[in-house]
Every structure is written in structure tokens, then in C-alpha cells.
Image (cartoon, coloured by chain):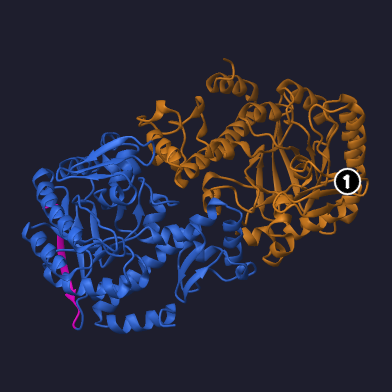
Chain colours: A blue, B orange
Amino acid sequence: MAIRFELLKESKNTEARIGRIHTPHGIIDTPTFMPVGTQATVKAMSPDELKEIGAQIILGNTYHLYIRPGHKLIESFGGLHGFMNWDRPILTDSGGFQVFSLNELRKISEEGVEFKSHLDGSKHFFTPEFVIEIEESLGADIIMAFDECIPYPCEKDYAKESMERTVRWLKRCKKAHKKNDKQALFGIVQGGIFRDLRIESAKMTVDIDLPGYAIGGLSVGEPKEVMNEVLEYTVPLLPKDKPRYLMGVGSPDSIIDGVIRGIDMFDCVLPTRVARNGTVMTSKGKLVVRNAEYARDSLPLDENCDCYACRNFSRAYIRHLIKAGEILGGRLTTIHNLRFLQNLMKNIRDAIKNDKILEFREEFFESYGYNK
Amino acid sequence: MAIRFELLKESKNTEARIGRIHTPHGIIDTPTFMPVGTQATVKAMSPDELKEIGAQIILGNTYHLYIRPGHKLIESFGGLHGFMNWDRPILTDSGGFQVFSLNELRKISEEGVEFKSHLDGSKHFFTPEFVIEIEESLGADIIMAFDECIPYPCEKDYAKESMERTVRWLKRCKKAHKKNDKQALFGIVQGGIFRDLRIESAKMTVDIDLPGYAIGGLSVGEPKEVMNEVLEYTVPLLPKDKPRYLMGVGSPDSIIDGVIRGIDMFDCVLPTRVARNGTVMTSKGKLVVRNAEYARDSLPLDENCDCYACRNFSRAYIRHLIKAGEILGGRLTTIHNLRFLQNLMKNIRDAIKNDKILEFREEFFESYGYNK
């Protein structure tokens, strides 16, 4: 087995749990947040800085890396780890989400998906087998199966058809995957917001027997309560001894609510994307540091944060950098947001350890301003 | 006196010398190259990284900082040092170059210059007195007098008129400058490419008696031989016991040729600007890493460099980042170019110490490809 999940503790009152994922490139403490490194770099960050903020695993995007610079080139540099000089765990997605969300003109068949490159319009064809080949070249510790991520809202008929195809594609992915000793293939539960489809998908996906499971197709526009509902009836169907990954979710409230419903892994581009535009997460809630009110503010972004940005610079300075379009501005806000999330995950793990995750949720939602 | 120049050694065969400038924020080994931090940040670099590449002094631009975020705001944060969290020496220019080069519509009078902001078109008026006020607010260790930097080519009549006004403005700057104990005011020799004007300017400027002198108005389009000629007849007129600063010059050949003619300080935006576009300086000459030929190149930018980029990443990876528009790409090339220049200055100082500066020039020009 490429990875081993060690379940350390289950929460008494909730589905939350703490654990450790042992991978060929090191250990990941769960619940964990994975910064997204779409194009073989977490935007604005160096590998050293990622270690400094405490990232134990990062995500790479198969679609983008296939398009540029190409998986064969990356393979010749020792995979993504060697190419980008990151020696800790990596997870690659399957490109499914990008193929479906970035491509207006994709054509789906049982065999796979034809799509056009967002760079030059050239035609490409992804099959489950080809995606696994790409992911094997990229060499991540955890690789995601090729799936279809349906939009929200979506007709139930299509959601069912798509979900069943995703299961068939998963079987083909598993069959195609040869590097089981070095890479763990995760299956993805789909089914939109339809309870029976989610349940069916979860059962069929678990039947295929994999080292980990993801829940896809959420946080795509549906209300947060709907996402939480889906998790409530889906997660209990996943085996306790395997990690569970909620794809594309990275807001503090959704992370906490996901953890309480049994999720171990999260990722999202939003914390880094909003950072570059001058919005940061703080212990007192969201702060738009580019706003005029911070022009003369000598406080750090967050008085309770220990990151490089908060130890060294004022809101006024960071606002100036962002307003002036200076690279250091986006670097500092990115460092801060990623450190904020690492600290959040650490606090979440501590709360689960002390059987206080519900109390932690209350306090966090109050101080962050979610209850307003 | 705010600064003290310690002349350590004069070259036997050339005008080159090594020294140390003692400032309120530390020592600068000369000859030195000063990275440019236009908007209170050296583009793409953090203060920690600037220290890591060995920068002993950086430059700030008075015009830009006056326009945004404003000198009074910066003053309230403890000046530029406090605002940007840089505890080593800083030099601020006078805004003269920007007022004249960025503003088509400036109006020059004996009193000063009216110009429009490049940001919002608002009208502003710089006088020597006001520029000193701004520079006192910014609080740099070395501040430049307000001068007019004429273009190349330029009519001799205008060059003379402008040079004489610059001398009168320098007297007003000196009179207005109150923080002599904390800041050293440098005068700027002008006069275009006219020998008699340069000589006259140098004599009048030195007569005003200042802690340091700059040569301005060069590297503005004239041939390199012309610049070297101007230095040959101008620099000997400057006192040996004061630092000499050649403004806006940062290509390796011009730095070496300037050092040989007695220059101690250099600055230029080019090394950082070309870096962000994917061009780096190496021990074997200029290398355009964004070119296709480096797509699969596993070598570092420069095999003889000890910077973070060269210790950790391949040309192929850095090319990918630059092509993909990723921030880390420009960060790595910037780190490299600035480290390259710091190493160059160190090698220059060693060569002067060993009375080998002319041999060093030969070898460097040969390996860098200047002799081709």
C-alpha cells in the first residue's frame, strides 16, 4: 500500500476524528488543509515558505500540468516533487473538474472527454486510462480518479447518468493504475445534491475498495446547509479506516462543519486567490486590507498570528503594496492566509483531541463573525 | 556627520578604490550595487531575502513614495526603514529623474518644477526645499539633492542653463536640510556629455562641500564610451575622501568600467526588471531563460551561483514559471540577478585589494561575452 491511514481518535459527540496519513513523502496530520499549487507552484509561495507556514501536503492540477509544461517533461525531472523541489506529500486531482468547468465545448462519451486547451484551443482527449498515465508521470503520493463534476443546479436524470459513468470510469482508473505501491488512488463520490444518488455512489465507490475516498461536486453553488446535509448522509457510508477528502472546500466555516461530519482533508484555491486581491482571514473575521480604512493602521493583519507577514509588517504597509500592485503584497497576504488555515487545522485537531470540537465551532463562529 | 567614508585602498593602476561607508544603519562595503526599491519594496523581494542576497543598502524613489502612499504617512511609521521593515541603510533619490522622465507636461522655473501625477493626473510642485522636506520624512541615510536630469541628446545651451540651475538648487537643498546628523546630502554633477560643463559642474558642486557626490545624467542613451570618457575627466575632480555614486548604472560592464574610473556606488532597476521578464545574468553571460531552448534544461540558472534559485531549481522549472506567469518565476530570477551583482561587487573588491582589477575586467568581459 502506498499510504496508511492511522486513526488516532474519534470525537465523542460528532463524526470528527484525528489521524495521520503515512505517505512515501512523509506524514500528514488530519484533519488537514492542502494549499493548491495549480501550475507546479502554490501561487506566490516558495517551497521553503510552504514549509514555514506548516503545509504537510500540497495539491497539483493534472489538467494544467498536462497542458503546460506537459507530464512527460515533469516525469523526466523526477515527477512533480523533483520538478518543483517539494519533498513532502503531493496530491494530484484528475483534471475532471477543469475539463468540465473551463471547457464550454467539451464532448463527453463513455470512452472519455474531448476538450480544448484554454491556452491555444488545441483538441485533447482524456480517458480514465490516460489520466492515470498522466498522474503516474506526475508521481504524486495521492492521485484522484477521473470523474465528472456536474454543475449546480443539475437535472436528476443527468446527475444519475453522470454518477454511474464516474463509477465505471473509476473501475477503469483502478485497472489502469500500476504504481499502487507508490501512489494511492482515491475514488470520488458524486451524485449532486440527490440523496439516493449520493448513497448509491458512495456504496458503489466503496465496493471498488480503495485507499481513500473523496466527496466531489460540492461547494459548486449550492447553499451551505445543503452541502452539510449531503455530508451527513454520505460520510457515514465511507469506511472509518480510510481518509475522507472534501474537494474544493476551504472557507473556515465549511472546513469546521466538514470536520464535524467526518471529513479529514480539504483543499481550495480561494484562500490564496482572495489573498492576492487583498482579503485576509483573521481571528476576528475577514479583513479587506486593501480598503482605505487600513491606510494608516499600524496593526499586523492579525494580532494573534505568528506568520512572517504578521511578525514584520503593518496593515498600512501591506495595503500600500497591494494598491501599488507590488508582488510582495500578494506574497504577504498569501503567507498569512495559508498560515491562518494551518493554525485553524491545528486548533481543530486539538479541539477534537479534547472532545471540544462543538465548543470550538461555537467560539470560532462567534469571533469570526459568522453568527452576525 | 551622518556618514563617514573610510578609504581602505586605492588601486595602483586605475582610479578604483575600496572603502566602507559608515551610516546610522550600518556599514556599506564599496564599490557597492544598490537594489532599487521604488515603491518601498524591491520588486518581488522580501527584506529577509534582500539580506540573504547580501544587500547592504537599497534605494527608494522619492517621487513614487510622495505620490503613494505619501511621505507623511511613511514618516508616521518611523520613515521608510520602519514602514518597509528594513533596518540597513537606505538612499533616496530626489525625484528629479522621475519628474523629468515620467512627465511630458512638467513646467520648470527657477523656483521648481510643476508636474502631474502619473497615477491620477493631479498637479504637484517640487522645489528643492520641498524635496528635502519629503526626504527628511522618508528618513534615508543618504539623500540626493533635487536636480534636473537632461535627456540625451541635448542642446549645449540648455545643458548649461540646466546644470547651473541644478547647482543653485543644490545650495537651496543644503540650506533646507536640517537633519545633517542623521542624513547625508549628496550633490549631483550634471552637464550632459559636455566636458567643460561637467568640469564646471563638478567644481561648483564640490565647492558646496557635501558628504558625498553623484554623477547624474549618464546611461540615458549615450554610447558607453562617451559615459566612460565623462567619468574619466569628471571623477578626478571629486574629493578622494568622499563616496562617489554613478546614478542609474547597473550592467556588469558599466559597473566594472565605472569602478576603474573611481566610482564607489551604483544603482539600476534593470537587473530586477529584466529578471521578471525572464532574463538573467550568469558567469557565462546573459541567459534568456524564457527561451524554448531551456524547456528541458536541468541546469541551474548559473552553475557558479550560490543563490536560493540556483541551489534549488532548474532552468526548465523557472522557464515554466515565467511562461505560466507565476509569481515565483520572477521571484527566483530577481533573487538570482541581485545575488549575481552582489557577488560581482565582492569579486571587484577582491580584485582591487589584490591590484588585479584590470585583469579581472579582461577575464570577466571574456567569460560574459562582451568581447564577442
In the visual, does A223 lie left or right of B146? left
Residue that numbered label 1 is attached to:
B170
Residue A67 located within the stretch drawn in magenta: no
Foreground pick, B27 / A163: A163
Question: In this view of the protein, can residue B13 be seen by the observer?
Answer: no
Residue at the top extreme of this rendering? B372
Please tell me how crowded label 1 is: few (under 14), some (14-19), or many (20+) other residues with Cα within 10 Å.
Answer: many
Residue at the left extreme of this rendering? A207
In the visual, does A56 lie left or right of B173? left
Residue drawn at (22%, 53%), measured in percent from left and top? A148
Quarter of the image where the C terminus of chain B is located:
top right
Q: Given the image, what chain letter belongs to the residue carrying mark 1? A: B
Foreground pick, B321 / B230: B321
Residue A317: give x, y in percent of width and height. 60, 62
What segment is highlighted magenta in the picture? A1-12
Residue B150: give x, y in percent of width and height. 82, 35
Residue B191: give x, y in percent of width and height. 86, 31
The part of the image, by quadrant, that contains residue B74 is bottom right
Question: In this view of the protein, can residue A315 be seen by the observer?
Answer: yes
Foreground pick, B351 / B165: B165
